[in-house]
Amino acid sequence: MEPQTRFNLSAAIQNWREELSAQSNLTAETRRELETHVQDTVAELQRRGLNDEEAFWLARRRVGQPDEIGEEFGKADPARANREGVLWIAIAFLAMNLWQNAADGVWLLLFPPNIGMAPNWSSISQLSYPLLAYAPVAWLAVSLARGRSVMRFAAWRSLIRSRRRVIVGAGILVPAIKSFELAMELTVGSGFLLQRGWTNAFWTILLRPRVLIWPVMLVAIIVWLLPAEESRSLKRA
Amino acid sequence: MGCAQTALDIHCCVMYKTAMLAKDLVAASSKPLVLSILAGGESYGYEIIKRVRELSGGEIEWSDGMLYPVLHRLERDGLIESEWKEADTGRERKYYFLSADGRKALKTERQQWLAVHNTLSKLWNLKPVST
């Protein structure tokens, strides 16, 4: 006879909570409310004599499948689903913009051109650029389309948990990547500011608002689209 | 937003799992039921479902998870408000209560449902209810 594994109610609720968090239509506050509901149902069923496993199984069945609940919340607030879609488009644009800037910088670092001479890059360096800059983006798009990275994608939400976190994160990341790319372009790429160094490049980027308009606009859109209650409710959760 | 539109929107949040009543009727009655229960005092999702089950003698059986989209829609429409509070068990729960607009909406709902009820009562030779 095979040994039976003991049912862990807390772990089961935790797993169920994770399934709920994959539903983009459910805010942290809603998830918390649903969890309270399941806990209430489990407690009542236990009082009626069901064991932990039976009570959880029935409570979960009563509350419905996470994807069905998510779908119902989507129907109840279609505008929210639209906002969510636009939010992720803005995040994708920002991520691609920053990734390509970083890739430009890394590529120049790996394959510096011969300063003062006509470009004489090898075919390896030519091939490496699209691999470095575009292949990860294509891989991510295909993965998401096939649903492979859905859980990981949902986990990324923690990065944009609150408006404050987005502003602070973008305030560090955007100037850092932009200045890195520009520094590579100006020092390694052209040698123009080789003698002036990194600090100068940082200030140069700040004085070139053209480069910052697009990411700043995207960050503003992301902050605007982030639901205000997300940050409040997560503090409670 | 007009009442008819809201009722249609709530209808979209199908919250039934019953063979007793037609699902359209259960969905359409969700708004007056929730508002009426909250008119009697604040409550939370689990308790609202239990109350409906008891009052209907089990004829209206809502799918638990489907009540919440309706509650959230009513809250967004300003008919109910909510607050997280600690229950006797020590666990925090989200309590809902009726707003001033909700009381007005309940009055309108009551008139409309009684109009339907009285019309059917006359057709079926039952005693009408005073509005």
Image (cartoon, coloured by chain):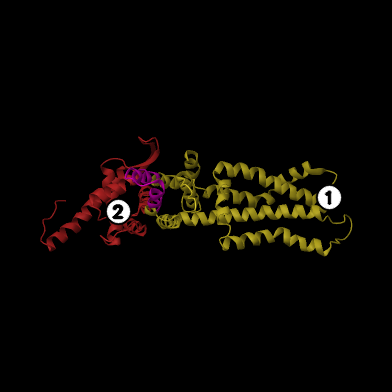
Chain colours: A yellow, B red
Q: In the visual, does A163 lie left or right of B122?
A: right
Q: Residues within 10 Å of mark 1 (few under 14, many from 20)?
A: few
What is the magenta range?
A: A39-60
Q: Give how far across and how far down residue A176 sits, in percent.
A: 70, 45
Image position of B121 with respect to A175: above or below: below
Q: In the visual, does B121 lie left or right of B62?
A: left
Image point 61% across, 41% down: which residue? A168
Instruction: Please tell me whether residue A43 belongs to the stretch shown in magenta.
Output: yes
Q: Give how far across and how far down residue A144 sits, in percent.
A: 58, 60
Q: Residue furthest right?
A: A117
Q: Main secondary structure of the magenta part?
A: helix
Work out whether disc 1 and disc 2 sit on a shared chain: no
Q: Nearer the viewer, residue B103 or A20?
A: A20
Q: Amino acid at mark 2?
A: Ser
Q: Which residue is mark 1?
A: A192
Image point 16% across, 61% down: which residue? B120
Which subunit holds the residue at mark 2? Answer: B
Marks 1 and 2, Cα distance to the nearest angstrom?
71 Å
Picture disc at residue B30: 2
What SS does tag 2 mark? helix
Q: Residues within 10 Å of mark 2 (few under 14, many from 20)?
A: many
Residue B103 seen anywhere in this rendered image of the structure: no
Instruction: Please tell me whether residue B10 belongs to the stretch shown in magenta.
Output: no
The reply to whether callout 1 and callout 2 are in contact (CB within 8 Å) is no
What SS does tag 1 mark? loop
Q: In the visual, does B72 lie left or right of A21?
A: left
Residue A183 seen anywhere in this rendered image of the structure: yes
Q: Residue furthest front?
A: A1
